Image (spheres, rainbow, N blue to C red):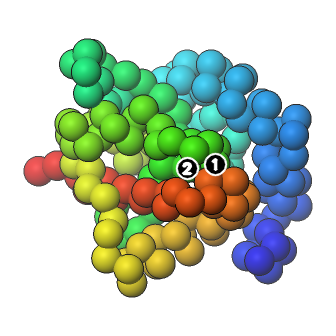
Amino acid sequence: MTGEDRGIGIYRRGLERFGRSAPGNWFLTKVAPRIDPPLLRISGGRFSSAYPVPVMLLTTTGAKSGLPRQLPLLYATDGDSLILVASNYGRPGHPAWYRNLKANPTVEVLAGKHRGSYSASEITDPAERADAWAKALDVYAGYSDYEERAAGRQIPLIRLRRST
């Protein structure tokens, strides 16, 4: 499905096209993770290098170290919960933040109005996963590229629910 089919504007279509290119992949893996954390902190989680694509600053607890780890991640919304895609850019292994969430599911989120403590759980129900995957693709169609690159590895989807 193209950006136009999904009802996104020309700027966002261009941003998505750039993100799916080789220079865009370089930017997403090397530059954005360095500049987005301060941008997100300064703006209260409202602006990142990928604006208007939703990006959060996620704080996890290291599975081995027990130390806080912060990183910017794209997210989709599903009602009151947030969905994360553990794509690792289509690399063979799961990202470190996914292992951190499995060991310590309580996280801090800074994403505009979505801020505070959340609890993470993996989406395993097939119907729920299919719905969450569709929502993730609406945010960034490049996840389908990552799915192809990750051949043999099912990309985990994580649901974050606000802690009470």
Return the mark for residue 54. Answer: none
Q: Residue furthest front?
A: 152
Answer left or right for 21 relative to 72.
right
Q: Which residue is mark 1?
A: 90
Q: Residue at x 70, y 41 (%)?
A: 50
Q: Residue at x 42, y 32 (%)?
A: 96
- Above or below, 81 against 6 in this view is above
Answer left or right for 43 relative to 107.
right
- Above or below, 142 against 32 in this view is below
What residue type is disc 2 on? Ser
Percent across and percent down for residue 36 are: 60, 27
Query: What SS does tag 2 mark?
Result: loop
What residue type is disc 1 on? Gly
Q: Could you say which is closer to the camera, residue 52 or residue 92?
A: 92
How many other residues sit within 10 Å of disc 2, few (<14), some (14-19) or many (≥20)?
Answer: many
Proximity of marks 1 and 2: CB atoms separated by less than 8 Å? yes
Q: Residue at x 51, y 42 (%)?
A: 93
Q: Residue at x 40, y 35 (%)?
A: 97
Return the mark for residue 87. Answer: 2
Quadrant position of residue 79: bottom left
Quadrant position of residue 5: bottom right
